[in-house]
Image (cartoon, rainbow, N blue to C red):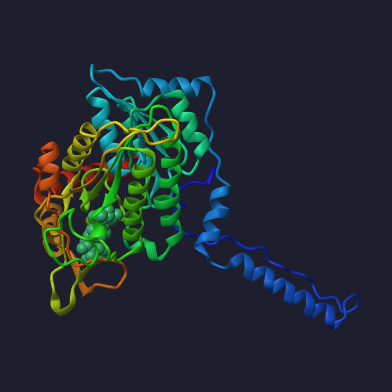
Amino acid sequence: MDNIPSSPGKFKMEKGPYFHRRWQHSSFTKFTFWSILFVGIIFFLFFRTPSSFSSDTSRRSLRTYNYGGSAWEKKVRSSARVTSKNGVTVLVTGAAGFVGTHTSIALKQRGDGVLGLDNFNDYYDPSLKRGRQALLEHNGVFIVEGDINDATLLKKLFEVVSFTHVMHLAAQAGVRYAMENPGSYVHSNIAGFVNLLEVCKNVEPQPAIVWASSSSVYGLNTKVPFSEKDKTDQPASLYAATKKAGEEIAHTYNHIYGLSLTGLRFFTVYGPWGRPDMAYFFFTKDILKGNSISIFEAPNHGTVARDFTYIDDIVRGCLGALDTAEKSTGSGGKKRGPAQLRVFNLGNTSPVPVTELVSILERLLKVKAKRNVMKMPRNGDVQFTHANISYAKKEFGYKPTTDLETGLKNFVRWYLNYYSVAATAE
Ligand SMILES: O=C(O)[C@H]1O[C@H](OP(=O)(O)OP(=O)(O)OC[C@H]2O[C@@H](n3ccc(=O)[nH]c3=O)[C@H](O)[C@@H]2O)[C@H](O)[C@@H](O)[C@H]1O
């Protein structure tokens, strides 16, 4: 699994070799011509077949990351230096991601040592990730450019810094994209996670791990609100299935190696510096451009709704989970006693129909949306989500405080500022 970026970005076809020979009557027999043509076609088809697995591997294996050396180690140590009395040392994977950026800044600002790790893949606009990186640098957080599948790099990071915690937020996100590029979900959310756990189980001392699961594990469940006690055996997308697999993998590593593991089921997180692949983000872009937007509805004109959760509330949940995480109990790669294993819902507890989300955006943007209401395609989406958050409230006082209108106001302000600044700079 070494040296393979965990998320490959959107599938792009590689240009295959094009077999081209000029036919010369004098030097080839008819048989030779047809043989060469046949071999050429096989060659051509082989290199052009759009298999996401093979394309991922070939594209990824081309990428190399530079790390090591005394200047690099100095940056790593300095970023991970604790500046408050009871501070902890956290490795944040996916630090250039949406939740990763906000969480890293919050940890750093309260005096924890924070080191970021990110592969800057191109699943969505990498320049947004670079923008977040600049924000993190401004806040004293260094991001190592590398991948969670790179065991050598992970081991090296633990050699340089003895992390007490890992905030594992690197993942292939997005529900619908899983049908386009299934391999990237397996690669990041399963192989990458296992690789990270393998490294964590062997280091001394083992860190406590808090990681991003997803509300999507509730899949086709109909009992609301969703509780952590509910069964989660009906995922509607491969994304959900890989997150569910992550929860089972966490159980195994906790059981065998004594790793302290806390999974967080995030509910449709939104806010400034968000993900452009999410509906609230691209609806904003399309409404402003005058493009029509597709709004999904359930059978019989049923409402599709989400428990949209504002990023600041999610960050408070991440910190609460981290602060209440107990130490791992293993050493020498072996379990030495029972270790903590938890899963929390982090939602807003007030689902809002997607149609209402659009109305709020229309008010904030002062532009009427061109609504194209359509039947929800069978592409991994579920009709609604709604979190029961009593467990997180009990364990670390989790209490979301931002309603959708307030949160979207902040998002729209950021969006207009960020993109108009970028447009002026061009
Ligand atoms: O909680 C999660 O675990 C997940 O949350 C997010 O998934 P979702 O809740 O599906 O968010 P998002 O795509 O923004 O669609 C929002 C709504 O718009 C509807 N939707 C979407 C697209 C469209 O064209 N039209 C439409 O109506 C759509 O039907 C839905 O009702 C993360 O992306 C995912 O990575 C994961 O973290």
Q: Is residue 88 above or below residue 257?
A: above
Q: Which residue is drawn at the image coordinates 72% and 71% (left, top)?
A: 40
Regarding residue 387, the answer to whether it shows in the image is yes
**Picture quadrant where residue 20 is located:** bottom right
Where is residue 184 drawn, in percent x and y?
44, 56
Regarding residue 289, the answer to whether it shows in the image is no
Most distant residue in the bottom direction: 30
Q: Which residue is drawn at the image coordinates 9% and 55% (left, top)?
A: 350
In the rendered structure, the answer to whether residue 372 lies left or right of residue 40 reads: left
**Picture quadrant where residue 166 is located:** top left
In the rendered structure, the answer to whether residue 20 lies left or right of residue 409 reads: right
Q: Is residue 181 above or below residue 136?
A: below
Where is residue 307 drawn, in percent x and y?
15, 56
Q: Is residue 197 above or below residue 293?
A: above
Where is residue 212 drawn, in percent x and y?
29, 46
Which of the image's four quarters has the C terminus? top left
Which of 190 and 316 lies nearest the eye of the viewer?
190
